[in-house]
Amino acid sequence: MTSSGKKSYLFYQTRRRRPMLDQARDVYMWDVDGKRYLDGSSGAMVCNIGHSNPHVLEAMRRQMEKSTFGYRLHFETEPAERLAEKTASLTPAGLDKVFFVSGGSEAVESAIKLARQHAVAVGEAQRWKVISRQPSYHGCTLGALALTGYAPLTAPFDAMMRPMPKIPAPRAYLDGLDPDDEATGHRYADMLEARIVEEGPETVLAFINEPVGGASTGALVPPVGYMQRIREICDRYGVLLIHDEVMTGGGRTGRFFGADHWGVAPDIIAISKGFAAGYAPLGAMVAHERIVDPVLDAGGFLHGFTYAGNPLACAAGLAVIEEIETKGMMENAIRVGDVLKSRLSALMQRYPIVGDVRGKGLMLAFELVANRETMQPLPKELGAFDRLVEIAYDNGLIIYSRRTRGGYEGDHFMVCPPMIATEDHVEEIMDGLTRSLDTFM
Ligand code: PLP
């Protein structure tokens, strides 16, 4: 049934239906009954530049009048060329080869397949294991899912996937460690080295991580020294480093890529959500030339999607980046993000169940716990994960949640409004959130 009671022919994950969206502008969305919502999570951390941006709509309209599809084996298209060049200008030196896809799972899938073909091309066919973190989310296609450290999502499919090794995500706040102490960062990073050695270094192809954790860890910022040490370890063992920037790419943390905060260059980057910011399905895998060239020399990359490099999606992506740059949105994400983070942190005084607030720029999250000292989670039966999101939704505030800590023992909530949010929007978010927490309590 749709929300208006008519039979629906659509289905997604569950039977739950939502109000019909009528229109969206800037940070607001309206349903067909005229109810207004503040998009406090930019959808699923996607609509980074806000809704209905006139510059992007105009760029898409212009492109639509020229062409909306050119199959990549028949034509090059100018928007794809220009977006590839622009993207390469934003990545670390050498990461100059851009492979377009239509979403985050496709970007991750492409990254691991390129890594694998590179190993085969350079005579290291025994390398196939991709180490990832627990918890993590890298996508829902079987390749990306095998890397995902989140049992409730993976369990039914385990029989269909080759198990991939996992190491713990660096959740210093849960382990009672100081994230500002380099020893903490090294301690977690060294778990990668131990795992590589245990697996047999000659069998390990790559390590994949989210520079700032997405919904799986709730905006987890790695401890000092972690990112650099991970890079060193990968280099030591000839393991490729893949950054899953599907959520962090596009400026939300205050830098175009999350890893830019640490000046660490990976071998391959996966991007999607903020890349075309919801204006079109778009993603990309960006790889270093030294990875791509041997694969192309050996006969070509055995991988590609029909919609790759769609000119309309690429025109949207290009216009999105132009807006981020010309409107200073990354600077705004840092400025308004600081205000929002301190206002969220203040919730800890008022609500003992708010156990942690974390994140960078406008990629922020708070976590609810039963006991702040021990960080013991709320009882699963309370269903905080769903309930608070629903209460906020009724209050006209959209926030995003996913249970973590292996599946059922914790509740965190992403608060990630578009990068055009102002301090007035922060006040509105906090008002919706406190009203929702009051009801929840
Ligand atoms: N990687 C990360 C870090 C994500 O957050 C997501 C989506 O949430 C994905 C990959 C998968 O992206 P998509 O849902 O576009 O396939």
Image (cartoon, rainbow, N blue to C red):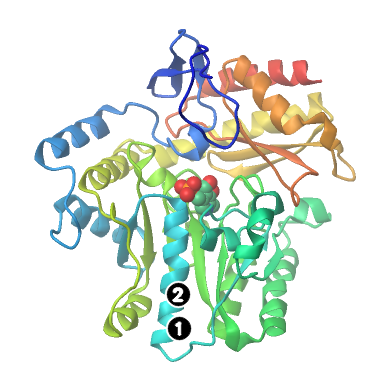
Crowding at mark 1 (Cα within 10 Å: few <14, some 14-19, many 20+): many
Q: To which residue does mark 2 refer?
A: 115
Q: Please, which residue is most extreme toward the left here?
A: 66
Please state which amino acid type lies under the numbered disc 1. Answer: Ala
Q: To which residue does mark 1 refer?
A: 119
Which of the 4 quarters of the picture holds residue 227? bottom right
Q: Residue at x 55, y 56 (%)?
A: 138
The answer to whether any part of residue 225 appears in the image is: no
Q: Residue at x 50, y 58 (%)?
A: 244
Above or below, 214 against 389 in this view is below
**Depth order, front residue of 229/161:** 161
Describe the element under mark 2 as helix, strand or loop. Answer: helix
**Depth order, front residue of 207/422:** 207
The x and y percentages for residue 195 are 70, 77
Above or below, 436 against 169 in this view is above
Q: Residue at x 41, y 44 (%)?
A: 274
